[in-house]
C-alpha cells in the first residue's frame, strides 16, 4: 500500500479510537466518567418505544426504517423486526453521565418544552449519530484489505472527505459539550412541533438535507453539509418533534425559520420527508405499517430506497427539497384512530 495512504489510514483509525469508536462516553470529561460504558438508549425504552410497539407473530416489536425491505403482507417480518430492548441502543455513554443528563427527560419527568429539555433530546440524538458515524467509518477502514477495497471503489478523495467529516463531527461534539457544561442551551435554534395524540413513529437522529424548503443550498462555504438534530417522540396524549441547529450554522437556522412560516399540514409533510430521507435510528409501529396499506407501503419503500441510493452515491442529483408522499402525522395514523 502507498505510504501516504498508510499515513492517512492511521490518522483515521487513531482519531476514531480516540473519539470512542465502540465504547466511550460522548461527554468529554473522562475523569468524571464511570468505568462502565452501558448500552444506552437514544429513545427511552419503557416510555416512548413501549407506546408504539405491537404484536408481530406473537412478539411485541417495532419496525426499523433500515430493515423494512418488502411490502408483501406475508413477508417474514419477524426476522427483520427489532425489540424495544435493543432498538436505538449504542455504547456512547458511561453509566454516570447517562443517568445524570437524561434522568431529567425520562421516567416521570414529562417533556416541558424548555430549552434544557430541547437541548438534552438534541444532544442525545447527535451523540447517537456521532457514534454511528465513527463505528461505520472503522467498519469500512478497519483493516488493510478493507481499506484497499474502499479506495479502489471510491478513490482517495472519498477517504479524505470522510476524515474531514470526522473532524467536523468532533468539533460539533466539543461545542455541544461546552453548551451542556455552561448550560447555555439557547446557543441553539429550536423548532418544536407538537400535536395532540399518540403518533406511531419515533426517531433520534441527525438530518442533513441538501436544500432548504425554499430551495437554497444547505452546504456552507466549505461545502460541508449542515447537520441538524432531529428527535421525534410519541406520548400518550401528545407527540412532539424537535429540530435543532447550532446558531452559528446559518443554513440550519434558515431551514428552521422557513419551517416556522408553514401551515401545520406542510410542517408535517416536511418533518415526515426528513425522516424518510435521513432514516437512521427511526422506528415505526407495525400497526402504522399495516395502516399505510399496500400502496402506502410501496410508496414508502420506494422513497426509502431512492434516498439511500442518492445520499450514498449521487447527492448532486438532488436539485431541491423533495416532499415525500407520506405524512406520518396525519390523523388517520394516530394511535386513537388505529386503536393502539
Image (cartoon, helix red, strand yellow):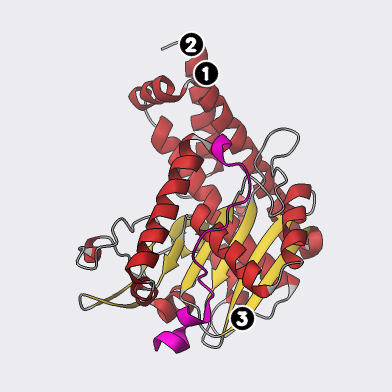
Label 2: state its secondary structure. Answer: helix
Q: Please name the residue that numbered disc 2 is placed on.
A: 3
Q: Please name the residue that numbered disc 3 is placed on.
A: 195
Q: Which residue is drawn at 32% across and 65% down?
A: 82
**Category of crowding for the residue at label 2, using alpha-carbon neighbours closer than 10 angstroms: few (below 14), some (14–19), many (at least 20):** few
- Spatial CA distance of label 2 from label 1 is 6 Å
- Spatial CA distance of label 2 from label 3 is 56 Å
Residue 190 painted magenta: no
Q: Is the magenta stretch mostly helix, strand or loop?
A: loop
Q: In which quarter of the image is residue 337?
A: bottom left
Residue 45 drawn above or below residue 231: below
Q: Where does residue 164 sit, x and y in percent of width and height?
A: 61, 32
- Spatial CA distance of label 3 from label 1 is 51 Å
Q: How many marks?
A: 3
Point out the frontmost of discs 3 and 1. Answer: 3
Q: Please name the residue that numbered disc 1 is placed on.
A: 7
Residue 97 drawn above or below residue 223: below
Q: Where does residue 142 sit, x and y in percent of width and height?
A: 39, 32
Q: Which numbered disc, 3 or 1, marks the residue that appears first in the sequence?
A: 1
Amino acid at each position: 500500500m502507498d505510504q501516504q495512504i498508510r499515513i492517512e489510514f492511521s490518522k483515521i483509525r487513531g482519531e476514531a479510537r480516540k473519539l470512542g469508536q465502540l465504547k466511550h462516553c460522548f461527554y468529554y470529561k473522562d475523569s468524571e466518567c464511570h468505568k462502565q460504558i452501558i448500552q444506552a438508549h437514544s429513545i427511552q425504552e419503557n416510555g416512548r418505544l413501549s407506546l408504539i410497539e405491537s404484536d408481530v407473530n406473537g412478539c411485541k416489536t417495532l419496525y426499523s426504517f433500515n430493515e423494512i425491505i418488502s411490502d408483501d403482507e406475508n413477508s417474514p417480518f419477524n426476522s427483520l423486526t427489532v425489540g424495544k430492548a435493543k432498538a436505538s441502543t449504542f455504547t456512547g455513554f458511561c453509566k454516570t453521565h447517562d443517568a445524570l443528563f437524561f434522568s431529567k427527560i425520562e421516567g416521570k419527568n414529562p417533556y416541558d418544552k424548555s430549552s434544557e429539555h430541547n437541548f438534552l433530546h438534541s444532544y442525545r440524538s447527535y451523540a447517537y449519530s456521532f457514534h454511528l458515524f465513527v463505528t461505520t467509518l472503522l467498519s469500512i477502514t478497519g483493516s488493510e484489505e478493507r481499506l484497499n477495497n474502499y479506495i479502489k471503489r471510491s478513490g482517495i478523495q472519498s477517504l479524505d472527505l470522510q476524515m474531514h467529516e470526522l473532524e467536523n463531527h468532533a468539533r460539533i461534539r466539543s461545542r455541544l459539550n461546552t453548551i451542556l457544561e455552561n448550560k447555555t442551551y439557547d446557543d441553539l435554534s429550536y423548532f418544536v412541533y407538537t400535536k395532540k395524540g399518540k403518533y406511531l413513529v419515533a426517531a433520534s437522529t441527525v438530518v442533513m438535507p441538501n436544500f432548504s424548503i425554499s430551495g437554497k443550498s444547505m452546504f456552507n462555504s466549505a461545502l460541508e453539509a449542515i447537520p441538524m438534530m432531529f428527535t421525534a417522540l410519541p406520548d400518550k396524549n401528545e407527540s412532539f418533534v424537535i429540530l435543532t441547529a447550532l446558531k452559528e450554522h446559518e443554513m440550519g437556522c434558515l431551514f428552521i425559520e422557513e419551517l416556522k412560516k408553514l401551515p401545520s399540514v406542510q410542517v408535517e409533510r416536511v418533518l415526515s420527508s426528513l425522516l424518510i430521507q435521513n432514516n437512521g435510528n427511526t422506528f415505526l409501529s407495525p400497526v402504522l405499517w399495516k395502516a399505510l396499506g399496500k400502496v402506502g407501503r410501496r410508496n414508502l419503500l420506494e422513497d426509502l430506497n431512492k434516498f439511500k441510493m442518492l445520499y450514498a452515491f449521487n447527492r448532486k442529483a438532488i436539485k431541491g427539497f423533495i416532499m415525500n408522499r407520506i405524512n406520518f402525522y396525519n390523523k388517520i395514523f394516530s394511535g386513537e384512530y388505529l386503536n393502539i
